[in-house]
Image (cartoon, rainbow, N blue to C red):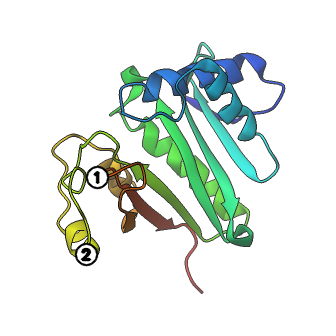
Amino acid sequence: MKVLVLQSGDTDLINQVANLLVEGFKDTGSTSWPNLKAGLSEVKESLQDDRISLVAVNNDWKVIGWVSGIRKYDGHTWELHGLVFEPAYQRHGNGRVLVKALEERVGELGSTTIYLGTDDENYRTTISGTDLYPNVLENLLNIKNPGNHPYEFYQRVGFTIVGVIPDANGLGKPDILMAKRVKRLQ
C-alpha cells in the first residue's frame, strides 16, 4: 500500500475515491454520500487549500482507502472528515497507516490536535435510540458497542471520546466526538 497526496489532476483517483465513499457508507445509515455526484463533490472539496486529502493505493494503483482533514481553529486543530477503506483491506492495519499519515501531515503543519465526529445513525451503540438528556455525560461514560460502531477503531488508533451531540442526526441518533493530540506540549 502506498499513501499519496491526492491532487486535483488525479482524475482517475478522484473518481475511484468518490465511488469508494458511496459504496463504503451506503450500509452505515449515513446519508452523506448517497450517489456519485455527492461523492465527487466531497472529494473535490477535500482538494482545497485548507484541506488535506490522502489516498491509499495498492500496487495496481487501485484506490483502497482515503482520508481527509479540514483546517479548523486557526490551524491549531484539524477535523478528520472522511475515512473509508475497501472492505477487503479493512482490519489489516491499513486504516491505522492512513490515519497516521494524516497525523504526520497535521503535525508538520504545526497543529496540535485532530478531532472527528463519528455518527451513530443506525443504533450501533448503547447511546443511540435513547434519550441522553439530562445525564448526557453519564450515558456517554457507559457507552457500549454491540453493533460494531467505528468509535472503537478510533480508540485503537489513539483517539479519546471527548463528547457527544445528542440527536445530531435526528432523535436518538447522536454524533460521538473524539479527539487526539498529535503534538506534545512543551
Alpha-carbon neighbours of circle 2 within 10 Å: few (<14), some, or many (≥20)?
few
Q: Residue at x 32, y 52 (%)?
A: 171
Task: Looking at the image, tell me whether mark 2 or mark 1 is earlier in sequence order.
Answer: 2
Tell me the kind of residue under disc 2: Pro
Task: Identify residue for label 1.
Answer: 172
**SS for dot 1:** loop
Between residue 106 and residue 142, name the one nearer to us. 142
Residue annotated with mark 2: 134
Residue 141 horizontal/vertical position (percent)? 22, 70
Write down the quadrant of residue 130 in the picture: bottom left
Q: Toward which corner of the image does residue 160 lie, by quadrant? A: bottom left
- Label 1: how many residues lie within 10 Å, few (<14), some (14-19) or many (20+)? some
Q: Amino acid at mark 1?
A: Gly
Residue at figure coordinates x 38%, y 23% from the top left: 87
79 or 39: nearer the viewer: 39
Residue at x 65%, y 59% (from the top left corner)? 106
